Image: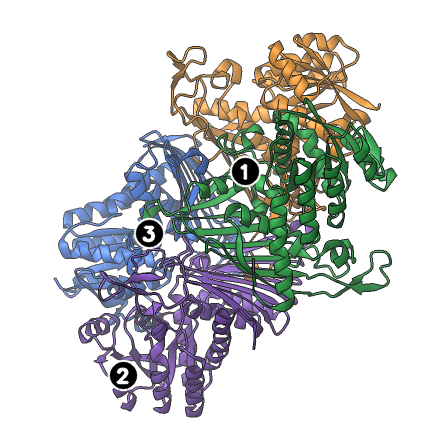
Chain colours: A green, B purple, C orange, D blue
């Protein structure tokens, strides 16, 4: 295989971020196989055409199902709202296409399990785009944890805080309705947070969740003179325990004034500690209990060295990378997996694992009980 | 009244911190009444004598009950372990002595309520030493919240993290036994955290709590060759909702590697946000949504100006104060309350309020249920 | 004009960064004219071919002078070592090509003046790539200064600190020889620092400079068993005064352990202050004397809002950009200037202005005297 | 010797800070000898009496020379403006009194040399109060440098920045007149900065200095309706070279908006780096080149451990100390030196060493030349 011919579905925020990744991956890296940006698919033909021109997609298509019948498409890049993922991914798998799927994985665990089953049955490569796993600083955290620098882990203290719903005039868009979004920040932000917790600490044994709606009515997107009910929580607080005994707190909100995209965690272990924040994604704070007592402190590591994962392929040390670069890192690994017939992580297994936690949290949100996993 | 004659009970860590406050208060401030350090009381006569000499207590006494019969004592400073507070405070009140009481308030709500009832009945001044309320940065936070700079409050994200139990050889001291300490960090650290949440946001409507013991056996203090069971939790995670609708997370632990005395909170409101950390107690971070969009950011306020509470009496701007200074600030207000017949906050009312939350949390810790307040 | 046909000379670090900019500029922005990556030029044909393939240059060429005779080249992108800039830029100007020139501008003021004269005479667009001017945070600083937020400026405290020469085994490459590099960090880093000082504060009235060679012998690049003399300074310290009366310190070094690419400045004015650091290029610290005394502090502004220059075209607020993005910002403005027949800054005028300061500094370095400008 | 009987001259800012130190030293430490606060001396009898009462000085005296004739005074604490130091210190030495002298040492090198000669001849203990040397974080820096953690030192980048002269209405007080203050921030702040550079790096081989007056006229202190000429510089910038080959920049100013008492240094060596800032005096940043490449970073050390100098005697780890504590640390060492007949640092030798640098800087400020030392 020399090329991987890709069709993308979706051309908004994630459509741009994915397209950029396909464009950039062969500039800075050497995947085994070159991505070919074959078709961009969407429903608004005019917007779609402009998108395809801008990003270099060779053709456009307004019916995603037609993509699946084509022999010249090897992979489907699903960059649509979550509620569309299941149908598309299952059909793509059945058509034997590899799948690069945006998060959140699916609106329900049942959907997610069906997606996984279809992908596994078809034997296609399936990737779920929790892009933060491929920030070099997060990979450094993973490496240090695996090497035992933190010892036994006691605490995960995480938060994903945004503030874009502070304005009461923000309309009632699809992210605020249950049918389309399943939940509020719990799904959108919590899925990222849970995925990183899985990646860095392990699986959960139990979870609970408390949520709140601060602003309950908002202007309708289609008619701002009328208002409708916000159907999802504005913020969700989880606490939990991992199977290895560590404790977790995870806070997700769109009402954290002053925080724009603060995805942060603190991990405390018997020998060391690590903290990270997506708003300063090129840095990792690391405390080593192995340092002499009088010169211990959190090290502010600028993760831009040649010895750090991926980042050395970009620029010299001290020259930071941005938000979109982790998507490029995902692209290279997805391409290599497709080329070599392997797998890539996180994938639909991880998606199912996270949905189990999220559905348990949603149940706890209602019942006020702790839910075992 | 020209002088307030004080007897202190307890001569360890808190005995020192309180004694320092009585010594320093008239150097830097002008309370209406001068404290007279009359008697230091404790059980170990030799240590006690050294303590009294060092700190300037005129006499020593080994039986605290004898203090209460003396006419030349106006106030009792209770700096003993928590389980002794109730008996001492009630007796002191009944003897008509003003009370300066170290935290945690009491081991049970019942004890706390009895203490409050006794103090109220006797009409004495009662102060509960949640010293963090008198850090100038915390007072600035309070002032800004009261002035509406944060608008409606949505989130309290707090943590009190220490790491002094990481060492498995740390002995099974009184802080690790239920009878003497009531609980682990929930009581010791959580009482501080809850008190600040009360002070800055308001009362709780509901709370839940999850806890964990990471190290379950420790060497006996009296015989390190044998071990005993740790009886209290190593870490406790709370989430809750305030009566005003704001959400809260509060994490307390003695297993946060790299954190020595990190008592931190983040408060997010509809108009602004504030964060603080005791390890950098002279600073307050403040985000104002009223700043123009392109020049908003968390301000790193060095709280050492003449316009800030208390701190101007110490040194010029930019010259920071330390941990013990907030005790001095408490001393001045206690002295003034005793002199003028007023009251001072926090007091036993606040202690009772906090114990209600802590007992509910302890109940939730067992049952896994949310507890209404 | 619909397209701007570009030939690039140079295919190492800067060749990559420029090529990336030409590739990305039309994805995220809408310049009036589309760049066409026509020819890549260099001396090592094999490397060059790989470079061209990777970055999308249509052809390759090993003799830069041949480029100038072609009608299908509108602009020359000079990404070569500094000592080659003058000959290339002058010839390009004479051939009527627009010029996108990497920094440092030239090895001598005389060269720089000739470059400027040639470009002006030919009427071509000339751009000098001091990329830091187009970091959104730097542009915000400029805007605030222009709006008077800092008042009268008193202090510029700048430093450009790297550490890549700490290793004594680093070979004696072209950057360490006078004939090829003119000077050490004074030229390479100092030109950036001086350019930002010009941009944000104004012109210098006087400068002085002190320098030092810490490691004086290094292995020869061509034969590591032998060593040769380091011909340029290892670090250079300047102080100076601006024409508007403000003072400046500028420190440049390649021996600042722990600093990888720390280009930082502090600006203090009568009404406010600003600080910035390239290693955290998405943030700007701003202190406003107009804030109430008790709530003043340096604001940590995350410069990723739609209201900030350029950055809104990339990703949503809170999603940071990286080192290479400022090159893209330069590309758009260069393209627009070429299309509209205008000019772009910084350009060869700025290059000449900076070289006057740098040559004065070099003279001061030798004589130990202050040099007026 | 059981007691050291002290007389203090001066009762403003430094009078308070010194008095506090004599009061606190035996509470937290165990010097060999107890200080007795015998006499407070000053010219304003009413203020002086209040000062003595407040701080616990047994007597007052308005003629400092009378102190020297008394047998019951062992040491003179000089807390007066600089221009009075020489006469007082010389007389005190001649009277055989130990001397605890506030900084800046003296207005001229000649004065300083006479002070040193007198003290040495008399064989008394002489201490010069550069209090920052006894901040635990600075002592940790010293220890690490002495142990070789930084290797060969290349760079000292220092600044002492305040902002209290930004207000043009600040009157023309003694600190702004040449006769009383010798110079502006160069003397007042620069003496601290030079002393720390001497302490941590070594002696200077050469220095130069550039200065500026930003506001040249100010209201007279005695009659605000009239103005007078500011006689000293508003800011002074030094660069220099140490005898060991390291480079230095030192910036001092009272016009750095937003900085209240920022005394900061960065030290870069072949193996590591250290930075510190007085506004965060309990922390030290340390970069170790010995850490593995992929996990290097500046460690943020909270210098409050038992293994850190002095600080363990105050409070448990994580409980910070404030500005005045370093004065207490000086008191203990001064007392011990007086008791044991030893010496303490910094002393008049250090004062003379610093004045040599300061006078050279002042000369350079005028001549624009580098001055060898």
Question: Horizontal and vertical percent for residue C321?
Answer: 63, 39
The secondary structure type at the circle numbered 3 is helix
Q: Nearer the viewer, residue C245 or B38?
A: B38
Q: Chain of mark 1?
A: A
Real-space Cα separation, disc 1 to disc 2, in angstroms: 61 Å
Is residue C107 among the parts visible in the rendering? yes
Q: Nearer the viewer, residue A219 or C96?
A: A219
Q: Residue at x 82, y 30 (%)?
A: A59
Which residue lies under the disc numbered 1? Answer: A136
Which residue lies under the disc numbered 3? Answer: D136
Instruction: Say if C6 sits above or below D161 in the image.
Output: above
Q: How many numbered circles does the render carry? A: 3
Is residue C286 among the parts visible in the rendering? no
Badge 3 local density, few (<14 within 10 Å), some, or many (20+)?
Answer: many
Instruction: Say if C242 sits above or below D175 in the image.
Output: above
Real-space Cα separation, disc 3 to disc 1, in angstroms: 35 Å
Badge 1 local density, few (<14 within 10 Å), some, or many (20+)?
Answer: many
Question: Horizontal and vertical percent for residue D195?
Answer: 33, 44
Seen in the image, is A271 located left or right of residue A9? left
Real-space Cα separation, disc 3 to disc 2, in angstroms: 38 Å
Question: Horizontal and vertical percent for residue D79?
Answer: 31, 58
Q: Residue at x 59, y 45 (%)?
A: C284
């Amino acid at each position: 295989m020399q090329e991987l011919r890709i069709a993308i579905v979706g051309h908004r925020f994630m459509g741009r971020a994915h397209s950029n990744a396909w464009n950039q991956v062969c500039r800075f890296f050497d995947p085994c196989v070159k991505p070919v940006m074959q078709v961009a698919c969407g429903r608004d033909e005019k917007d779609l055409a402009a998108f395809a021109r801008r990003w270099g997609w060779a053709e456009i298509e307004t019916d995603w199902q037609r993509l699946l019948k084509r022999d010249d498409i090897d992979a489907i890049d699903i960059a649509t709202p979550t509620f569309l993922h299941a149908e598309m991914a299952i059909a793509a798998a059945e058509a034997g296409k590899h799948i690069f799927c945006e998060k959140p994985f699916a609106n329900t665990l049942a959907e997610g399990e069906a997606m996984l089953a279809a992908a596994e049955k078809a034997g296609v490569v399936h990737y779920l785009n929790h892009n933060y796993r491929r920030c070099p600083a997060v990979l450094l955290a993973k490496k240090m944890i695996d090497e035992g620098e933190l010892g036994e882990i006691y605490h995960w203290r995480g938060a994903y805080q945004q503030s874009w719903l502070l304005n009461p005039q923000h309309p009632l868009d699809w992210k605020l309705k249950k049918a389309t979004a399943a939940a509020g920040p719990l799904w959108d932000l919590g899925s990222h947070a849970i995925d990183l917790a899985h990646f860095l600490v392990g699986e959960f044994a139990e979870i609970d969740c408390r949520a709140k709606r601060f602003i309950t009515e908002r202007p309708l997107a289609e008619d701002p003179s009328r208002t409708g009910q916000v159907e999802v929580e504005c913020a969700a607080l989880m606490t939990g325990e991992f199977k290895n005994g560590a404790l977790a707190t995870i806070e997700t909100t769109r009402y954290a004034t002053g925080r724009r995209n603060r995805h942060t965690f603190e991990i405390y272990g018997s020998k060391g500690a690590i903290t990270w924040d997506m708003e300063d994604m090129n840095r990792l704070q690391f405390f080593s209990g192995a340092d002499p007592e009088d010169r211990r402190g959190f090290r502010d590591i600028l993760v831009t060295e040649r010895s750090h994962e991926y980042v050395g392929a970009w620029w010299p040390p001290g020259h930071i990378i941005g938000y979109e670069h982790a998507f490029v890192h995902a692209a290279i690994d997805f391409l290599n997996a497709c080329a070599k017939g392997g797998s890539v992580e996180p994938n639909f297994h991880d998606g199912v694992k996270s949905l189990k936690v999220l559905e348990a949290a949603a149940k706890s949100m209602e019942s006020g009980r702790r839910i075992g996993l």
